[in-house]
Image (cartoon, helix red, strand yellow):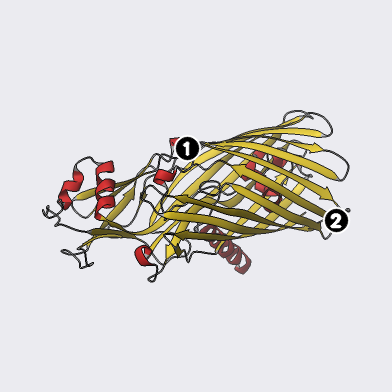
């Protein structure tokens, strides 16, 4: 019984930790899931990449050796963000993942937990106009994959994914931006704030602050859950060439909500004196979803020691990131919207693996993505503007049962100027470590 309780506690802790905020660099998605994929530029559609295959392409699970495999991974994400001359204090995020699969000649099935992505920044009390502002979004999945070998050349795979999202946000904005957010959500609603020199029903503020945040490292104040899935195929076209395809469905998350009093809205005069009283209420984020992703790729065995891989992904941001719509309800609903108008993103990933000997593999790669966020709509709290990644890694097999993979990814700095004239820059260095056990 003690062992069962310990295992249960470990699984619960892993679920909670995987739901914590994750900094991602292809928009809100990670550039690579699992250290093998990460170290080769994120390419993973057409070769055995361990249990991370359930996140990348479930059909690749049928490319591994028969038997049972368990992986436990830890990612350390290191964003470096500056906005309006102020550096974000959010510089290190830990993101674990676990996976377990059982395979025979015809079927592979299993379960895993992965952080899918997210974004966020954190500016402290000395950050000038950005003082005491933060955002933290995390999206994770529990995945139930099944792969099937149709014939000696073709394998297919599907997964059912339980998805969840959580978010914190603390944002202070001036009257002009506050009016724009209210009118974007509901044209004319900013009249409640009055006009310059003419108070409205809510007074005549110079600034407004929306705050829904908690101190939990693993879950934000606003939460939602839902189901989604993916499907894929791999074709072993020749002994040296494998082709892969996968499609990840758009999530079907419910609206993210806080508790009945989990959010506050405060309006201030020009000297930041509170006008009236701070209102407490429920905050709802409407129809926040993660996008559909379609991937095609290949793996080519150039020699007994060298394997080359390449993927092309299309990420459908335009269908899920048009507008970030929120309702604050403290008896009288107020709606706010942040226009996003993200563009679909194309990601090209290239990589290679060189087997030094029977125990050690060296890996390297590069990826390039278009920036999905138009400059006019980029926001200091959501600067998902990174484009390129340089990646490297190593894998080492200690014996027939135990192996380890390590990867590092660096995204060079990208700088833009927002539609409000705010200079924003973002670079990032990420690490992943995975231990694998086969039995």
Badge 2 is on which residue?
Answer: 359
Residue appearing at x 82%, y 29% in the figure: 238
Name which quarter of the figure residue 189 lies in. Answer: top left
Name which quarter of the figure residue 134 lies in. Answer: bottom left
In percent of width and height, residue 322 lies at 39, 39
| Left or right: where 11 falls relative to 280 | right
Between 366 and 176, the residue placed more toward the observer is 176
Res 101 visible: no
Residue projecting furthest to the bottom: 126
| Left or right: where 159 falls relative to 242 | left
Indicate the secondary structure of the residue bearing disc 1.
loop
Give the number of the disc on residue 343. Answer: 1
For label 1, the crowd category at 10 Å Cα-Cα, with few meaning under 14, some 14 to 19 and many 20 or more, is some
The quarter of the picture where the N terminus appears is: bottom right
The quarter of the picture where the C terminus appears is: bottom right
Nearer the camera: disc 1 or disc 2: 1
Between 135 and 20, the residue placed more toward the observer is 135
In percent of width and height, residue 340 lies at 40, 43
Between 250 and 373, the residue placed more toward the observer is 373
Position of residue 346 relative to residue 24, above or below, is above
């Amino acid at each position: 019984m003690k062992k069962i309780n310990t295992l249960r506690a470990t699984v619960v802790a892993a679920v909670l930790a995987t739901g914590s905020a994750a900094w991602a660099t292809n928009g809100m998605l990670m550039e690579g899931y699992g250290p093998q994929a990460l170290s080769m530029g994120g390419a993973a559609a057409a070769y055995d990449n361990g249990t991370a295959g359930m996140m990348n392409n479930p059909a690749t699970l049928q490319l591994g050796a028969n038997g049972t495999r368990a992986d436990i991974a830890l990612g350390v994400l290191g964003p470096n963000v500056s906005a309006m001359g102020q550096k974000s204090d959010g510089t290190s995020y830990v993101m674990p993942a676990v996976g377990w699969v059982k395979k025979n000649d015809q079927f592979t099935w299993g379960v895993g937990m992965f952080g899918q992505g997210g974004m966020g920044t954190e500016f402290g009390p000395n950050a000038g106009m950005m003082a005491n502002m933060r955002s933290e979004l995390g999206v994770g999945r529990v995945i139930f994959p099944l792969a099937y070998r149709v014939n000696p050349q073709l394998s297919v795979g599907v997964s059912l994914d339980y998805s969840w999202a959580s978010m914190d946000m603390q944002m202070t904005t001036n009257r002009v931006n506050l009016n724009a957010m209210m009118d974007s959500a509901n044209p004319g609603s900013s009249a409640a704030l009055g006009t310059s020199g003419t108070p409205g029903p809510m007074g005549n503020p110079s600034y407004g602050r929306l705050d829904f945040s908690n101190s939990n490292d693993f879950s934000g104040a606003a939460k939602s859950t839902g189901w989604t899935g993916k499907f894929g195929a791999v074709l072993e076209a020749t002994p040296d060439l494998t082709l892969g395809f996968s499609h990840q469905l758009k999530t079907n998350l419910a609206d993210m909500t806080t508790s009945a009093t989990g959010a506050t809205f405060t309006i201030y005069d020009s000297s930041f004196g509170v006008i009236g009283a701070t209102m407490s209420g429920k905050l709802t984020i409407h129809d926040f979803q993660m996008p559909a992703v379609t991937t095609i790729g290949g793996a080519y065995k150039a020699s007994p020691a060298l394997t080359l891989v390449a993927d092309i992904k299309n990420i459908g941001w335009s269908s899920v990131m048009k507008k970030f719509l929120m309702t604050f309800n403290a008896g009288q609903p107020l709606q706010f919207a942040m226009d996003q108008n993200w563009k679909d993103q194309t990601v090209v990933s290239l990589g290679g693996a060189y087997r030094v000997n029977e125990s050690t593999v060296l890996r390297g790669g590069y990826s390039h993505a278009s920036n999905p966020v138009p400059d006019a709509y980029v926001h200091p709290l959501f600067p998902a503007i990174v484009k390129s990644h340089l990646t490297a890694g190593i894998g080492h097999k200690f014996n027939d049962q135990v192996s380890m993979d390590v990867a590092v990814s660096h995204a060079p700095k990208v700088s833009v100027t927002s539609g409000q004239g705010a200079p924003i820059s973002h670079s990032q260095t990420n690490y992943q470590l995975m231990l694998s056990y086969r039995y």
